[in-house]
Image: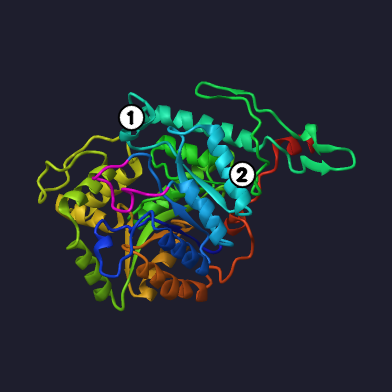
């Protein structure tokens, strides 16, 4: 476990609550760059490790308001790199619906533009609705998507290693611009990808941009344990979170990595009030703003089954496993059964945090809650969300973060430049340099 917790912002255009955009003081719009820049600068003022832009390559009227229309995330990160100085910049890109060369080039560019602050959330793509957007007849099965992702990540890292440090010499006297001994052609041929290389950009400042993942299935956990630097989780219960963290750390060891190789960060929606009753009343008021049909669509998306035909005041029906968001589905079904929720109660519960845990109360109560999870080994920090934007996130930065800082649980200033510095992760050496030093 880390000595101090790590904090990230899950940045959407409308907050996490399905109805949060309707609050009188809410600003919204995932194409509203001024709002997104304000959030980035606010998170940086709070010394957050990173901000993270979730994404998908499909949409519709049933999408969450913060995700229905949105800027392409890598374009957004490039713009935010010019607006910020220290905070890490992460985004989702699907391995199922993109090409390794383009993605390797884009993330290397963002890492250079930001001086080493880029992060890639590697996802396989949960929605079958994306397939027709890319000329595919069907969405690949879960196991096949992860096999593709494993090879994809191998290819991207190989491309990032196209040039060793110091390969571009620019010697005017000799006329040598690049050292040919420090340029490497990948020549990858595998079951899913054939990529020659080299990449036409030098090695990223971080060696590799930080790799983030959120897989919760067995194959997803194995993939994360072998390759990820940061893992997002969705646990609602402290005991389940500790078990998940221990399981993932065990898998890291089995993959030949230290138990501390991966930073485990559950998502948490924070609702700050002047009292516990005040915070609870805010949540209750938000529930009145939700379109019940839209809320059920969000729950169905998280569970991976259409629940609209089931009775609202009965218990959650017994459902088979989905190939979609398995982590969200397992956590929500566990919470529903543990608390004996009706489908209506689970729908409203999911509306508040879109599947993540909700921590509410006074600033001290929220700090106590976060400290409890962190100190008991359930996580290395948190990915923070708020129900609407921007005022509730300002409250987190101005009222909760200072308490964590006073307790010595969170940094009071940045001590490094890169995102790897913030997370306490070493820069991966170039494989050729490792071979030469043996």
Where residue 251 appears, as percent x and y from the top left, is 50, 41
Q: Name the secondary structure under disc 1.
A: helix
Q: Which of marks 1 and 2 is in front?
A: 1
Q: Is 320 placed above or below 34 here? A: above
Residue 69 among magenta residues = yes
Q: Which of marks 1 and 2 is nearer the N terminus?
A: 1
Q: Give the range drawn in magenta.
A: 59-71
Which quadrant does the C terminus fall into?
Answer: top right
Q: Mark 1 points at which residue?
A: 132
- Please indicate whether residue 3 sits to the left or right of residue 427 in the image: left
For the image, the number of numbered tags is 2
Q: In which quarter of the image is residue 137?
A: top left
Q: In this view, does 393 lie above or below 342?
A: below
Q: Mark 2 points at which residue?
A: 208
Q: Main secondary structure of the magenta part?
A: loop
Q: Position of residue 324 (x, y in %)?
A: 32, 37
Q: Can residue 276 be seen in this view?
A: yes
Q: How far apart are marks 1 and 2 (CA)?
A: 32 Å
The image shows residue 30 at horizontal and vertical percentages of: 37, 54
């Amino acid at each position: 476990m880390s000595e101090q917790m790590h904090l990230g912002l899950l940045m959407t255009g409308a907050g996490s609550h399905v109805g949060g955009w309707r609050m009188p003081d809410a600003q919204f719009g995932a194409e509203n760059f001024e709002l997104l820049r304000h959030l980035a600068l606010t998170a940086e003022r709070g010394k957050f490790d990173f901000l993270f832009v979730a994404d998908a390559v499909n949409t519709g009227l049933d999408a969450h308001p913060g995700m229905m229309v949105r800027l392409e995330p890598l374009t957004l990160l490039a713009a935010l790199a010019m607006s910020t100085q220290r905070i890490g910049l992460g985004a989702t890109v699907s391995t199922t619906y993109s090409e390794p060369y383009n993605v390797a080039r884009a993330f290397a560019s963002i890492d250079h533009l930001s001086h080493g602050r880029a992060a890639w959330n590697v996802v396989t793509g949960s929605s079958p609705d994306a397939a027709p957007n890319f000329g595919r007849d069907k969405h690949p099965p879960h196991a096949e998507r992860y096999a593709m992702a494993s090879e994809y990540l191998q290819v991207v890292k190989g491309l990032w290693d196209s040039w060793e440090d110091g390969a571009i010499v620019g010697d005017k006297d000799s006329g040598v611009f690049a050292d040919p001994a420090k340029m490497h052609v990948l020549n990858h041929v595998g079951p899913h990808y054939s990529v020659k290389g080299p990449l036409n950009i030098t090695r990223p400042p971080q060696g590799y941009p930080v790799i983030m993942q959120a897989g919760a299935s067995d194959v997803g956990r194995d993939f994360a344990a072998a390759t990820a630097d940061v893992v997002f989780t969705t646990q609602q219960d402290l005991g389940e979170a500790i078990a998940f963290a221990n399981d993932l750390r065990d898998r890291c060891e089995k993959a030949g990595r230290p138990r501390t190789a991966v930073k485990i960060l559950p998502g948490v929606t924070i609702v700050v009030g002047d009292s516990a009753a005040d915070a609870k009343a805010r949540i209750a008021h938000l529930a009145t703003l939700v379109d019940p049909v839209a809320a059920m669509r969000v729950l169905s998306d998280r569970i991976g089954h259409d629940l609209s035909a089931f009775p609202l005041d009965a218990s959650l029906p017994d459902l088979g496993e989905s190939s979609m968001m398995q982590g969200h589905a397992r956590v929500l079904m566990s919470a529903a059964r543990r608390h004996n929720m009706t489908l209506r109660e689970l729908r409203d519960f999911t509306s508040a945090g879109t599947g993540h845990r909700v921590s509410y109360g006074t600033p001290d109560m929220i700090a106590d809650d976060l400290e409890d999870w962190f100190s008991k080994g359930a996580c290395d920090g948190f990915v923070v969300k708020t129900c609407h934007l921007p005022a509730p996130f300002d409250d987190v930065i101005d009222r909760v973060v200072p308490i964590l800082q006073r307790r010595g649980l969170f940094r009071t200033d940045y001590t490094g430049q890169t995102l790897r510095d913030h997370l306490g992760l070493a820069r991966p050496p170039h494989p050729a340099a490792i071979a030469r030093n043996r």
